[in-house]
Amino acid sequence: MPSVLVAPYLLRNQPGTFRKILTDAGFTLIDPIGDFALTADELRHYLPQTDAMMAGGERMTPEMFAIAPRLRVIARTGVGYDLVDLKAATAHKVAVTITPGTNQESVAEQTLALILALLRKIAVNNQEIHNGGWDRRLVSPIRGKSLGLVGLGRIGRATALRARAFGMTVLAYDPVAPVTDFDTQHEILRVGLDELLDKSDVVSLHLPLSDATRGMVDRDFLARMRPGSYLVNTARGGLVVEADLAAALDTQHIAGAGLDVLNHEPPEPGNPLLGRSNVVLCPHIGGTDIQSMSDMADMAAETIVQLHRNEWPEGAVVNAELQAGWKW
């Protein structure tokens, strides 16, 4: 029987519809023990006996593909795949799939939660009260503020809907996504990046991590942001040069930052963003609430089953060049 390695620690040894989807299709599930992403040594142990992998935060390097002769599919529970060496996967004829349409609502909710936490000082006031204080100084509303979305894909659009419901003006920059009726219907103003940074009270990142976007939020990017504005990142930590963000916070050019993602997760002790009252941090949970995790797991399982049946899950396979002649 073919095997599936259940790598995401939130799914290991946990019930879920995804298990029935896979077992009904004749797969055996391999569930490691532990509460963290699998290490390289753990991957070396499991991959040689693995036919497919449900992947989370595991780094799939060329070495990992070389030791996994049976591996045919890496099914990411999410839409990012920057942890997978796509060139190596394609060279070994391993299909890499994602789960589009499953977690944008969760990420959008996390984005608005961070905006509220920053502008209304929820995190700061909570800590103040726990420390015996009672600070009733006025906070900023988000109604009437301008939100600049850098990226207007599924997550950006879901965030825009929520921001408009809160009475925010929404600007968007996306060099790829075309203007559609969605923009007109929800009064989203498409602008260039410079204009967005200049006019936005809050800048929210919704781009994939790639060679083109890595470190894009650097000293120059931050200097172009409106003085006293806020940065929110629920996309990928690698988009932001953290030392440059810390410097912008030190000068108070940037009023605060809400970050669900960091360059290193968990953060290293010397991270310059730690210990700041105007930085709200979350442990990369934006896309993984109870509902979205279930939806992502089910879709990942379904893509594995489809590919095993030599069916092609349209829109889910990243290295689509493998479609021609695909056979499991």
Image (cartoon, rainbow, N blue to C red):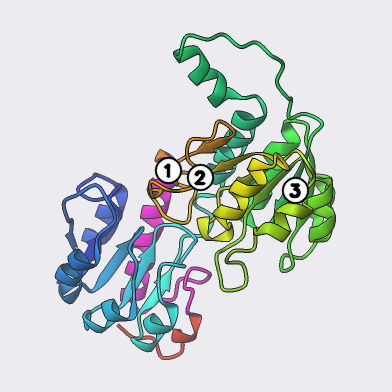
Between discs 2 and 3, the one toward the N terminus: 3
Amino acid found under the numbered disc labelled 3: Gly
Look at the image and say whether residue 138 sits in the magenta stretch.
no
Q: Which mark is residue 283?
A: 1
Residue drawn at x 70%, y 21% as measured from the top left? 139
Name the side, left or right, on which 260 lies relative to 12. Answer: right
Indicate the secondary structure of the residue bearing disc 3. strand
Mark 3 nearby-residue class (10 Å; few <14, some 14–19, many ≥20): many
Mark 2 nearby-residue class (10 Å; few <14, some 14–19, many ≥20): many
Q: Is residue 166 visible?
A: yes
Q: Gap in Å between the C-alphas at discs 2 and 3?
A: 17 Å
| Viewer-side residue, 222 vs 158 | 222
In the rendered view, tell whether residue 293 sits above or below residue 151: above
The residues colored magenta run 291-319
| Viewer-side residue, 96 vs 45 | 45
Q: Which residue is mark 3?
A: 148
Q: Which residue is mark 2?
A: 260
Residue drawn at x 23%, y 45% as measured from the top left? 14
Q: Position of residue 107 (x, y in %)?
A: 54, 45
Q: Gap in Å between the C-alphas at discs 3 and 1?
A: 23 Å
